[in-house]
Structures are given as structure tokens and as C-alpha cells.
């Protein structure tokens, strides 16, 4: 996992392919200019029992917060029970288990890059926030990061 200010994303080009172009596209609010798939997401924060972990094997989940904030739990997949694969042929699978591991805060103006093999549970309640609006960029990763 890497987390920093969105204006520093370009500094991570060596480990996040396309980071410079993604940063530029985000700052211009133009997801079509990103070199890979961008999903624009907005949702209300949830209680722990209505969230689930997921893990990816071939892509980096680059989350860039636009408004609001959330807690993201990050843990090793060994601590969880494997469940169903992600729908529509998407890279990864769901995992069952209670919130655990690192409680990472993602707030507007920041990004977090979650690498293959890092189980993550998004949408956790954050004091003073009710929702989050963010980009989730599906970055194909280089061979050394694939699980």
C-alpha cells in the first residue's frame, strides 16, 4: 500500500504505471484522459457488518478521494476466508472476515494504492464524514507485483 497527496502521485510512476497521466487526468477532472479504466464512485459509509473484504491479483486499486472520506481496512489474505470471485470476470475475489488489520483513512486530496494480494475493505465510518466520492482506477500492474 502507498498513500500520499494526489499532487505527489507522479512521484510513484516507477511502481504505479501511468501515475503521472492519472494525476493529470484527475486534476483536470477528466477520467477519459487516464491511461486505464476509471470508475467514479460515490457511496454512504457503512457499518462494519455490511462491508466485505476483496483482493485483486493482477491490478492495483488506485483510489483517489474527491470529497468526504472513509476508513479502509487492509490485511493479509491469510487472515480471511476466500469467498466468491468478483462478477463479470473482474480481477479478484471477495473474502469473509471482520474488519481487521490496518485502519487507513482516505480523505479528499489524497490517494491510496492497494497492490495485488492486499485484502481491503472500503466504506468504513469516519468521524465527521457520511460519504465519499472518489475515483477507483484499475491499474494493470507489472509482473513483479502480480500474485
Image (tube, rainbow, N blue to C red):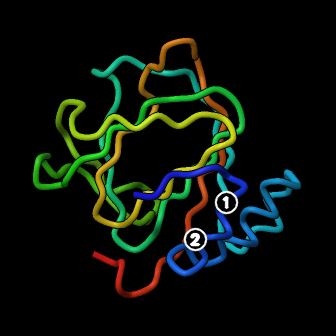
Q: Is residue 65 left or right of residue 85?
A: right
Binning the other alpha carbons within 10 Å of mark 2 as few (below 14), some (14 to 19) or many (20 upward) gives some
Task: Report the residue marked by disc 1.
Answer: 8
For mark 1, give the secondary structure. Answer: helix
Figure check: 109 above or below 77: above
Which x, y percent locates residue 11?
Answer: 63, 70
Q: Is residue 96 left or right of residue 59?
A: left
For the residue pair 31 and 93, the one nearer the viewer reads as 31
Q: Residue at x 33, y 34 (%)?
A: 103
Figure check: 5 above or below 66: below
Q: CA distance from mark 1 to mark 2?
A: 8 Å
Which x, y percent locates residue 79?
Answer: 11, 47
Binning the other alpha carbons within 10 Å of mark 1 as few (below 14), some (14 to 19) or many (20 upward) gives some
Which x, y percent locates residue 91?
Answer: 41, 66
For mark 2, give the secondary structure. Answer: helix
Q: Residue at x 45, y 84 (%)?
A: 142
In the rendered image, which quarter contains the C terminus? Answer: bottom left
Q: How many marks?
A: 2
Which dot marks residue 129?
Answer: none
Figure check: 5 above or below 35: above
For the residue pair 99 and 128, the one nearer the viewer reads as 128
Q: Are marks 1 and 2 in contact (CB under 8 Å)?
A: yes
Task: Report the residue marked by disc 2.
Answer: 12
Q: Is residue 109 left or right of residue 123?
A: right
Q: Residue at x 56, y 51 (%)?
A: 4
Quadrant position of residue 14 = bottom right
Q: Is residue 79 left or right of residue 73?
A: left
* Furthest-bottom residue in this view: 143
Amino acid at each position: 500500500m502507498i498513500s500520499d497527496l494526489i499532487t505527489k502521485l507522479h512521484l510513484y510512476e516507477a511502481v504505479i504505471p501511468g501515475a503521472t497521466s492519472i494525476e493529470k487526468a484527475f486534476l483536470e477532472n477528466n477520467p477519459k484522459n487516464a491511461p486505464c479504466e476509471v470508475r467514479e464512485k460515490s457511496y454512504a459509509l457503512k457499518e462494519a457488518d455490511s462491508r466485505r473484504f476483496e483482493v485483486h491479483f493482477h491490478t492495483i486499486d488506485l483510489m483517489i478521494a474527491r470529497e468526504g472520506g472513509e476508513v479502509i481496512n487492509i490485511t493479509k489474505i491469510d487472515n480471511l476466508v476466500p469467498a466468491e470471485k468478483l462478477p463479470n470476470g473482474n480481477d479478484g475475489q471477495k473474502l469473509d472476515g471482520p474488519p481487521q488489520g490496518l485502519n487507513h483513512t482516505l480523505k479528499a486530496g489524497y490517494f491510496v494504492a492497494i497492490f495485488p494480494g492486499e485484502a481491503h475493505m472500503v466504506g468504513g465510518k469516519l468521524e465527521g464524514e457520511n460519504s465519499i466520492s472518489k475515483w477507483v482506477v484499475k491499474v494493470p500492474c507489472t509482473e513483479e507485483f502480480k500474485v
